Amino acid sequence: MKLYTGGTFDLFHWGHENFLKKCNAISDEVIVSLNTNEFVFDYKLEYPRMTYGERETALYNCKYVDKVVENIGGSDSKPAILNENPDIIAVGTDWVGKNYYKQMGFTEDWLEQNGIVLLYIPYTEYISSSYIKQRMDN
């Protein structure tokens, strides 16, 4: 069973590792679609602190990740997802109440047509890249 998740994974921290560990516990293969610097800037109006290569290396050094792919579709994640043909797409519960479908560029019907289940994984509280950046800037 393949699990697909995506993100920026800037300033890789124990919250990221905890999320990926939970993904690994429910799947045979964990594939991470890594956002490009340009996509991050378009979405957050700032670049990640780490380069794409640094973020990719951090993910490959995480024992819970099997494969890292570039988010080739930008705001339309369907091409990257279809390239990997996952059974599950995992996202943190911090997306509950937000429009994750719009962010990813797909619909519930599209997921169903492609035999993909969207699974929410509990978000690790009290740690995030944004919080670390705030502490660094003060």
Image (cartoon, rainbow, N blue to C red):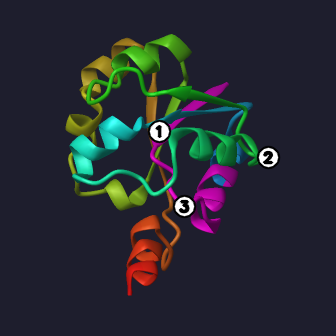
SS type, badge 3: loop
Of the numbered discs 1 and 3, the one sitting upstream in the chain is: 1
Could you tell me the amino acid type at mark 2? Lys
Of the numbered discs 1 and 2, the one sitting upstream in the chain is: 1
Could you tell me the amino acid type at mark 3? Leu
Provide the residue span drawn in magenta: 1-21
Q: Where 50 falls versus 66 (above or below)?
A: below
User: What is the C-alpha distance between the residues marked 1 and 2?
Assistant: 17 Å
18 or 46, which is in the foreground?
Answer: 46
| Residue 115 makes an appearance in the image | no
Of the numbered discs 2 and 3, the one sitting upstream in the chain is: 3
Q: Nearer the viewer, mark 2 or mark 3?
A: 3
How many neighbours does mark 1 have within 10 angstroms: few (below 14), some (14-19), or many (20 or more)? many
Query: Outermost residue, bottom direction?
Result: 138
User: What is the C-alpha distance between the residues marked 2 and 3?
Assistant: 17 Å
From the top left corner, tell me how far across and down residue 44 is, in percent: 25, 52
From the top left corner, tell me how far across and down residue 95 is, in percent: 33, 55
| Residue 131 makes an appearance in the image | yes
Describe residue 30's horizontal placement relative to residue 36 as left or right. right
How many neighbours does mark 3 have within 10 angstroms: few (below 14), some (14-19), or many (20 or more)? some
Could you tell me the amino acid type at mark 1? Gly
User: Which image quarter holds the N terminus?
Assistant: top right
SS type, badge 1: strand
Residue displayed at 64% across by 67% down = 14
SS type, badge 2: loop
Residue displayed at 45% across by 44% down = 7
Residue 36 figure quarter: top left
Looking at the rendered structure, which numbered label has been put on residue 6?
Answer: 1
Describe residue 103's horizontal placement relative to residue 138 as left or right. left
- The residue identified by callout 2 is 63
User: What is the C-alpha distance between the residues marked 1 and 3?
Assistant: 15 Å
From the top left corner, tell me how far across and down residue 37 is, in percent: 39, 40
